[in-house]
Image (tube, rainbow, N blue to C red):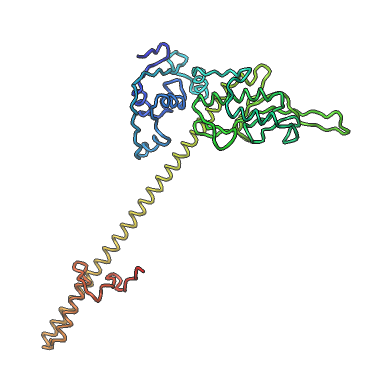
């Protein structure tokens, strides 16, 4: 049942399975108002397997990448939102960030930061205990700032702003988990957004103030009361701050959207890097296979050449033996000694001939090609 006028379409579980295995998710999102990760989450919710990283690249290069069977379950109907353009034909914005924001807005999640925490996450509980017992001091910049010092969620605020920081943290963690992401088991403040690692930090912006009671002019860094949420470190880090008309509490949706967008970009880069390496490996494999074929071909030719040479030389020996025997007969000098030698010589010609290669006990350790004794294996 489809309702394109309302911008929605209903598919069965099996139909969605066929969709995601019919073409890449990055192609499907051109028709639906979701990011590729949004479609992946819908599939995960309904136990529908999706192609793993590199699946389409393998098929593109003629490699095998088996289709994961659809697990048995009720073939329920699933409602999907179509994309919408200016002509009302339901095609959404091409911006990946815009798709993620649209998806979050229609997710039914509550992005409101409450005035009080009713159900704190264990990490928030831990941060509360650590921060409330920590004294202010000169650790780092900001003489009135309380630092988590890596013992819990990365938090750097003045004492009055600890409750607010914890409320922000609790809301962020709750939504991150509701979106199907994970908390890292290795580091505090590290989160796995679609398996990509990101660090989050809640801090109070510092301001420079003049110390009035000083005998000389000097300045100190102190908390400004302006809070920020920061993703990552150094160059490329993203940060949101309190604004005059927009506090951090109303920017949570944008922060989560950007976090998922960064994960999307990282995943895209990782896929591109993997495809590049797979192409390099494939080219190396082709090159190596050709080199092996060339080596085999040359070795076979050398064997042919050597075998032909052996046959020619064995015929040379027979011609000589026959001529020796004819001369002995004509000169009436064919005695028992010469007869024995002729038999011995014919046996050696048969041993050397590549078509016969008669076994001769005393020559069993001799290589017919080189006429040298074979090296011992021990």
Would residue 138 be found to the left or right of residue 276 on screen?
right
**Residue 335, placed above or below residue 96:** below
- Residue shown at 34%/70% (left/top)? 376
Farthest residue to the top: give it: 5
Looking at the rendering, in which quadrant would you find the C terminus? bottom left
Q: Position of residue 99 (x, y in %)?
A: 49, 22
**Residue 227, placed above or below residue 58:** above
**Residue 312, placed above or below residue 27:** below
Looking at the rendering, in which quadrant would you find the N terminus? top left
- Residue shown at 31%/73% (left/top)? 373
Q: Where is residue 339 in the image (x, y as percent from the top left)?
A: 14, 83
Nearer-the-camera pick, 314 or 109: 109
Q: Where is residue 337 in the image (x, y as percent from the top left)?
A: 16, 86
Nearer-the-camera pick, 241 or 282: 241
Nearer-the-camera pick, 82 or 49: 49
Q: Where is residue 81 in the image (x, y as percent from the top left)?
A: 43, 17
């Amino acid at each position: 049942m489809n309702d394109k006028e309302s911008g929605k379409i209903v598919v069965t579980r099996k139909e969605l399975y066929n969709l995601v295995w019919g073409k890449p998710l990055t192609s499907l999102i051109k028709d639906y108002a979701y990011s590729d990760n949004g479609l992946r989450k819908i599939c995960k919710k309904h136990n529908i397997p999706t192609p793993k990283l590199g699946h389409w690249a393998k098929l593109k290069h003629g490699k095998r990448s088996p289709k994961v069977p659809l697990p048995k379950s009720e073939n329920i109907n699933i409602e999907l939102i179509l994309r919408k353009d200016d002509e009302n034909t339901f095609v959404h914005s091409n911006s990946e960030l815009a798709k993620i924001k649209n998806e979050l807005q229609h997710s039914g999640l509550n992005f409101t930061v409450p005035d009080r925490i009713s159900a704190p996450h264990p990490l928030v509980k831990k941060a509360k205990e650590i921060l409330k017992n920590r004294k202010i001091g000169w650790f780092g910049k900001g003489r009135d700032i309380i630092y988590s010092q890596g013992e819990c969620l990365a938090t750097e605020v003045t004492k009055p702003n600890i409750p607010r920081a914890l409320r922000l943290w609790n809301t962020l963690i709750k939504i991150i988990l509701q979106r199907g992401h994970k908390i890292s088991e290795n580091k505090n403040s590290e989160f796995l957004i679609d398996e990509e690692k990101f660090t989050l930090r809640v801090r109070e912006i510092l301001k420079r103030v003049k110390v009035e009671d000083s005998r000389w002019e000097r300045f100190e860094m102190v908390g400004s009361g302006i809070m920020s949420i920061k993703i990552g470190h150094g160059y490329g880090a993203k940060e949101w701050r309190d604004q005059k008309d927009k506090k951090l509490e109303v920017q949570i949706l944008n922060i989560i959207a950007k976090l998922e967008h960064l994960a999307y970009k990282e995943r895209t880069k990782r896929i591109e890097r993997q495809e590049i390496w797979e192409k390099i490996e494939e080219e190396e494999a082709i090159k190596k296979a050709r080199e092996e074929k060339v080596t085999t071909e040359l070795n076979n030719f050398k064997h042919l050449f050597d075998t032909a040479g052996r046959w020619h030389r064995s015929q040379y020996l027979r011609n000589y033996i026959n001529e020796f025997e004819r001369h002995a007969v004509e000169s009436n000098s064919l005695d028992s000694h010469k007869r024995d030698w002729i038999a011995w010589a014919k046996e050696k010609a048969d041993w050397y001939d590549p078509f016969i290669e008669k076994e001769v006990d005393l020559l069993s350790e001799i290589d017919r090609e080189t006429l040298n004794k074979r090296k011992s294996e021990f």
